[in-house]
Amino acid sequence: MTGIDALVAAISALQRNDLEAWLRDELVSAESDAGPLTFSDMECARVRFICTLHYDLEIDAETLPAVLSLADQLYETRQRLLSLTAAVAAQDEPIQKAIIAALSPGNRSPETE
């Protein structure tokens, strides 16, 4: 867990007032167990990502929620794909081959297109 002051110090471009706005807008979240705000490693990475979007790529504050929503959807899709890959890998070889064959472009049914 990282405190707000340590996070601001660790990311040179990060402005404290921007971080406070992102907290207010619920773009990032912090924990406060009756003490100072702290950020998980995942939230610190999210703050770094937002800094890249905002400061380096110059995405304005009004657009950030849409971009982050899309990034969150992509992350969720990636996690689901990893789960699916693990589930297929756990199957017997004939089942794996059947799944792979069903996924090949020539075998798609009209409903999936």
Image (cartoon, grey):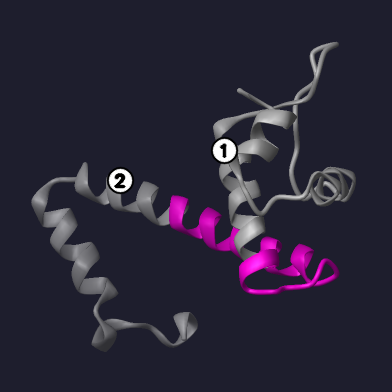
Query: Could you tell me the amino acid type at mark 1?
Result: Met
Which element carries disc 1, helix, strand or loop? Answer: helix
Residue 79 x %, y %: 45, 50
Residue drawn 75% across the image and 31% down it: 30
Residue in view at x 28 percent, y 73 percent:
103
Q: Secondary structure at mark 2?
A: helix
Q: Residue furthest top?
A: 34
Which of the two labelled residues, at mark 2 and mark 1, occupies the earlier sequence position?
1
The residue drawn where x is 14% and y is 62% is 97
Residue 107 placement, left or right of 47: left
Q: Label 2, on which residue?
A: 87
Query: Residue 55 or 22: which is nearer the viewer?
Result: 55
Residue 20: x, y in percent? 85, 43
Q: Say if the magenta span includes residue 65.
A: yes
In the image, residue 52 lies at what x, y percent? Answer: 60, 62
From the viewer's perspective, is residue 12 above or below residue 57?
A: above
Amino acid under disc 2? Ala
Q: CA distance from mark 2 to mark 1?
A: 26 Å
* Span of residues in magenta: 54-79
Q: Would residue 24 appear left or right of 27 to someone viewing this image?
A: right
